Image (cartoon, rainbow, N blue to C red):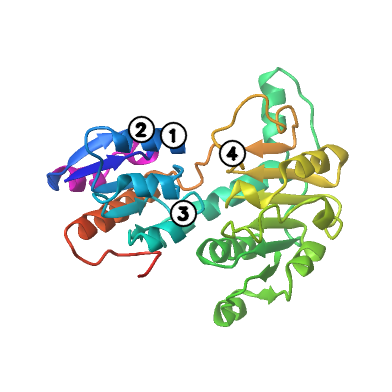
Amino acid sequence: MRILLTTTSYQDTPGRHHQLLEESGHEVVRDRGPLTEQRMLELIGADGGFDGILHGDDTITRSVIESALPRLRALSKYGIGLDSVDVDAATALKVPVLFTPGVNHTTVAEHTFGLILMLAKHLYTEVNYVKQHKWTRITGTELAGMTMGILGLGRVGKEVAIRAKAFSMQIIAYDLYWDEPFAQQHGVFRAQSVDEVLEKADVLSLHMNLTDENRHLINKSRMKHMKDGVILINCSRGGLINEADVAEACKNGKMLGYGADVLEHEPIKAPHIFHDIDNIVITPHIASRTRQSVERQAVMATENLLRCLAGDEPLAQANKF
C-alpha cells in the first residue's frame, strides 16, 4: 500500500516509529507540512493517490478527502487537535479519522510553564539585553500566591494545574466535563463560567479545542473582564485569541505579556502583528516536540494507521460511522 507522510517532527526525530513504518513494507511518500489544500490535492493527484495519510496540521478539506477516494482508507493525525481536518466530511465519506490522545500532556504542560516564567521574570527581554552587552534589570513577578486560571481541564490542563500547585498558586478552572475527584485532590476551584475565570486569574492558560463557537474567545470585549497585568498563555490553538486585540493589550499594559506556541495562521509570515512587541513570546509550535513525546505520538499515529490499513481496530478514532 501507499502512505503519504507529511509531519516534520515525525521525520526529523529518531525513534521506533521509523522502524515500524519501514517494517510495514508499505511505500512511503514524504513531504514537509503543514501543507495547504492545494499542495495536498497535487500530491494526491500524482501517481495514483494514497491508501493512508499520516499528517500533522495540513489542511484536509472535503475536496482533499474526495480527491483521495476511493483509494483512501484512513487519515492518521500525528497529534490531537483536528481543527485542520474536515471531520464531518470524513465521517460522511466513511473515512476513519485517527488521532493520538494521551501522548503529549506532560511536555505541553512543561512548555506552558516555561512561557509563564519567561514573561513573569522578563527572561526573554533580559537575555537579549545581556547579549547586547547591556545590564538593564527589570523587576519581575513571583508566581507564588497568584491565581492560575485554566480554560480546559483535560489532560494538559490537569498537568498545568499540578505544576501550578507546586508553585504555590491558587487554581481556578472551567471545563464542560468536570473531574471532581481530580479537582478535590489538587485544590482546583470550579468556576461556573469562562468569565469567572477571567475575572480572577493572574495567569490565564488556554487548553481548549478550537471550535466555531470559541474562535477568538479572548478578544477586546472579553478582556474587560480580565485583571490588569494578566499573563495570557496559549499552547492550544492560535484561533482561540484575536491576535490584534492581544497585541494591543500587551502594548497598552492591560496584559503583562502573551506567551504562545501557536498562531492563527502557521507558519509565521513577515510582517506579523506580534513582531517588535517585547512582552509577546511565540515559539514555533514545539510544545509537544520533545524526543520522548515525538516518539510516543509518532508510534501511536503509525500503529493507528497500520492497524486500519490491515483491517484491524485502531488505537484511537475520532469519528464513528
The mark that comes first in sequence, 4 or 1, is: 1
**Majority secondary structure of magenta residues:** helix
Q: Quadrant of the C terminus?
A: bottom left
Q: Where is residue 109 in the image (x, y as percent from the top left)?
A: 54, 55
Q: Which residue is at 87% across, 39% downward? A: 252
Q: In which quarter of the image is residue 314?
A: bottom left
Horizontally, is 154 left or right of 43 in the view? right
Q: From the viewer's side, name the closer residue of 236 and 240.
A: 240
Numbered circle sitting on residue 276: none
Give the CA distance from mark 2 to mark 4: 21 Å
Q: Is mark 4 on a helix, strand or loop?
A: loop
Please give the range of residues in magenta. Answer: 8-22
Q: Mark 3 points at which residue?
A: 86
Q: Mark 1 points at which residue?
A: 38
The mark that comes first in sequence, 1 or 3, is: 1
Give the CA distance from mark 1 to mark 3: 15 Å
The mark that comes first in sequence, 2 or 3, is: 2
Q: Position of residue 222 (x, y in %)?
A: 81, 57
**Whether residue 237 can be seen here:** yes
Q: Which residue is at 53% across, 61% downward? A: 156
